[in-house]
Amino acid sequence: MKDNIKKESKLITSGGEFKTLLNKNEYLFVLFSNENCGYCKIAENNIKEVIDSFPELNLHILKLSTAPEIFKEFNVNSAPVIKLFKNREAVYTGFGVRKADDIYYQLKSYFGSGNSYFKELAENN
């Protein structure tokens, strides 16, 4: 991927901030994570491989220690879990570590426009 278009993940620091983001954004893409979780880090890296293909999205990370009430409210009982919210409603949930191409195709079904991930892979090989 091109370095100049890399999006940085954004850490959500409280349940209140999560609620604000959920109410403010048409789309909210969240990785529900846990401290010192190796699988969560792998999930984050896989998401970062494809997130630039979707200009509508930024990756937000919410850790259990930060907002356990949000985990409970959205029935997140393990980590990692990714959720795509549209207009405050969860429209996609991915459990565990998802491969980058799986995440890409799941998101593409909502946005339809993403194609740079595989185009750049082909150009780099």
Image (cartoon, grey):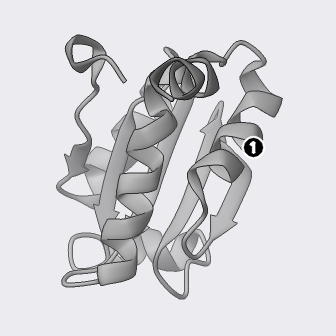
Q: Could you tell whether 101 is left or right of 25 in the image? A: right
Q: Position of residue 95 (x, y in %)?
A: 64, 73
- In the displayed structure, would residue 116 be above or below residue 27? above
Residue at the (61%, 18%) spot, across then down:
119
Side of 109 where 58 appears, left or right: left
Counting from the top left corner in percent of width and height, residue 63 is at 28, 70
Q: Nearer the viewer, residue 9 or 102?
A: 102
Q: How many marks?
A: 1
Hey, which residue is sitting farthest right in the picture?
109
* Residue at x 51% of width, y 20% of height: 120
* Rendered view: 91 above or below 73: above
Front-most of residues 15 and 116: 116
- Residue type at mark 1: give it: Gln
Q: Residue at x 53, y 21 (%)?
A: 53
| Residue 49, quarter of the rendered image | top left
Q: What x and y, as percent, mark residue 93?
A: 69, 60
Question: Where does the image place residue 18, in percent across and percent down from the top left?
Answer: 35, 49
The residue that mark 1 highlights is: 106
What SS does tag 1 mark?
Answer: helix
Instruction: Determine whether 84 is above or below 78 in the image.
Output: above
Which residue corresponds to the image point at 45% horizontal and 53% vertical from the top-left? Answer: 46
